[in-house]
Image (tube, rainbow, N blue to C red):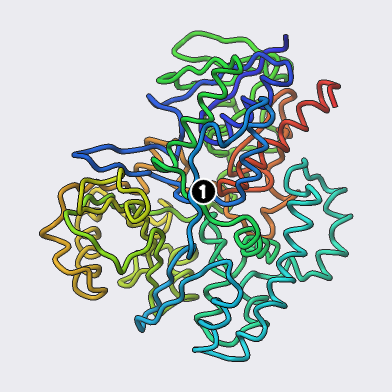
């Protein structure tokens, strides 16, 4: 059996481990932290359970394919609940839209703000369906994407306006700023700016409409545990508290990894670690002809996030399972985060409150919630040791006194904070960038680091920084694309 080593046990690493093990490889996974899951880790404290990162399941059929690769069925491992609505979007004037797959409900809500916009909803979703068809159904997102594939796609991309910015295309459809935000914000969920991420990402609204938004009982960590269980049942060897210190390269071929001074040999190595960490820290400079230090550092990296995990002895029915609370500023706020790299006085935020759906996530009459505020990455120079506590207090004060979560402060029983510094130290994320490379046009498709490493034979990538990109569906698709690259290279496809 050919031996494969995977660095990192996030969703991408676990999914690829299952795929390769069931293709006849002997797979070993090495994970830095004490538990699998990567960004999808979990906190348990005083009866409250918090997902630390990803919080929603879309495209369950993509997840099902991973289980099917092992001859398993997802329903035997996960208990999924369909969410309706998917999320609530509160705008700065306290108006809101409950976003769902129900076309009639969507048009009724949109018509309150702009009737002409509502009349365009069906046609817009048909447009996004074409993008979804190309990326998901036709397999563009699950196949290694080289320059030849890009050249073949360009005529269609121009026709579909797929290389224009997400926001500019949405703005050509809708007039009301609420609707422009509602259909263009999805790149933020994968670390990108709607004002420069290509409109190909507008396949996400249709992906949600077609496949739904789901919750896994017990939180997203239950998906981690399910994938870990399937991997172990398949014969994958998972090593935790085992940080890889070096990728061993001989004659420009990956030959294994060094962990705690011990070399583990393999026929191929896959990194599910952050792209920059892989190249700057795990590969010695002489083997990197394309990805020199200068080139790696010159890439544009995603924003980061500031997270507060709250256990609250009070129910807040105004919050749904997923809730977005938006600042009056949109483009200017995104610019402050991505370009100016400052910590502005205003902010938009996303709240995940799984206890609205799953009472087991919090004690009786209480809420388990996390608050995520997009922030600049560590290129900002912000000193989070000094800034974290005051910033958290500002956010909580806003939620209680401006947004109206009555008596929030005096009912907080658990409070944990995760900053951009933690993304760097705990996750090895360069600049604390929570999603890896920014998904802008010049860093998408064949312009993204490939599923195969360009410098070292037998070295591959999986996860948010390779093709097709971040987000749970995107990362699982990277596992499928990287599996195809490996099978091609080992003459198994």
- Seen from the viewer's position, the closer of residues 444 and 477 is 477
Q: Residue at x 48, y 70 (%)?
A: 335
Instruction: Let me know if residue 433 appears in the view.
Output: no
Q: Is residue 273 shown left or right of residue 204?
A: left
* Quarter containing the C terminus: top right
Badge 1 marks a residue whose secondary structure is loop
Q: Residue at x 77, y 40 (%)?
A: 144
Q: In which quadrant of the rendered view does residue 219 lie?
A: top left
Residue 382: percent from left, percent from top: 33, 55
Q: In which quadrant of the rendered view does residue 393 lie?
A: bottom left
- Seen from the viewer's position, the closer of residues 205 and 314 is 314
Q: Residues within 10 Å of mark 1 (few under 14, many from 20)?
A: many
Circle 1 residue: 435
Q: Is residue 261 shown left or right of residue 407?
A: right
Residue 19: percent from left, percent from top: 67, 27
Residue 383: percent from left, percent from top: 29, 52
Instruction: Let me know if residue 74 appears in the view.
Output: yes
Label total for image: 1
Residue found at the far left of this picture: 410
Q: Is residue 51 above or below residue 239?
A: below
Residue 205: percent from left, percent from top: 62, 64
Q: Residue at x 57, y 30 (%)?
A: 13
Q: Is residue 64 shown left or right of residue 126?
A: left
């Amino acid at each position: 059996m050919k031996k494969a080593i995977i660095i990192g046990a996030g969703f991408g690493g676990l999914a690829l481990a299952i795929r390769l093990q069931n293709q006849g490889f002997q797979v070993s996974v090495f994970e830095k932290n004490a538990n699998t899951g990567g960004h999808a880790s979990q906190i348990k404290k005083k009866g409250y359970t918090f997902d630390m990162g990803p919080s929603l399941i879309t495209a369950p059929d993509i997840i099902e394919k991973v289980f099917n690769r092992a001859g398993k069925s997802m329903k035997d491992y996960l208990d999924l609940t369909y969410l309706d609505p998917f999320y609530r979007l509160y705008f700065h004037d306290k108006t809101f839209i409950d976003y769902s797959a129900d076309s009639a409900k969507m048009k009724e809500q949109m018509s309150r703000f702009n009737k002409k916009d509502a009349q365009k909803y069906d046609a817009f979703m048909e447009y996004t369906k074409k993008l979804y068809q190309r990326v998901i159904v036709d397999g563009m997102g699950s196949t290694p994407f080289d320059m030849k594939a890009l050249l073949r796609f360009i005529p269609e991309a121009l026709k579909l306006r797929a290389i224009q910015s997400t926001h500019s295309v949405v703005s050509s459809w809708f007039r009301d700023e609420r609707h422009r935000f509602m259909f263009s914000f999805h790149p933020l969920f994968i670390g990108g700016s709607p004002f420069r991420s290509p409109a190909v990402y507008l396949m996400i609204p249709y992906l949600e409409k077609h496949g739904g938004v789901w919750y896994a009982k017990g939180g997203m960590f239950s998906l981690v545990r399910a994938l870990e269980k399937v991997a172990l049942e398949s014969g994958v060897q998972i090593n935790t508290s085992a940080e890889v210190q070096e990728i061993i390269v001989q004659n420009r071929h990956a030959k294994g990894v060094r962990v705690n001074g011990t070399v583990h040999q393999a026929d191929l190595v896959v990194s599910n670690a952050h792209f920059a960490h892989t190249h700057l820290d795990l590969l010695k400079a002489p083997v990197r002809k394309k990805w020199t230090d200068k080139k790696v550092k010159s890439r544009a990296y995603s924003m980061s996030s500031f997270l507060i995990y709250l256990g609250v002895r009070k129910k807040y029915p105004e919050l749904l399972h997923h809730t977005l609370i938006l600042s009056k500023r949109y483009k200017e706020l995104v610019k402050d985060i991505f370009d100016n790299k400052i910590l502005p006085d205003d902010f938009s935020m996303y709240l995940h409150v799984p206890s609205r759906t799953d009472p087991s996530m919090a004690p009786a009459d209480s809420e388990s919630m996390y608050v995520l505020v997009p922030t600049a990455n560590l290129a900002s120079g912000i000193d989070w040791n000094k800034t974290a506590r005051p910033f958290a207090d500002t956010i909580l004060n806003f939620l209680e006194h401006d947004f109206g979560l009555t008596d929030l402060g005096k009912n907080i029983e658990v409070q944990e904070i995760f900053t951009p510094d933690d993304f760097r130290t705990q996750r090895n994320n360069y600049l604390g960038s929570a999603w890896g490379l920014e998904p802008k046009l010049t860093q998408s498709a064949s312009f993204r680091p490939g599923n195969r490493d360009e410098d070292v034979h037998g070295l591959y990538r999986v996860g948010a920084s390779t093709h097709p990109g971040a987000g749970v569906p995107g990362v699982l698709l990277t596992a499928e694309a990287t599996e195809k690259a490996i099978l091609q290279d080992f003459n198994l496809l």
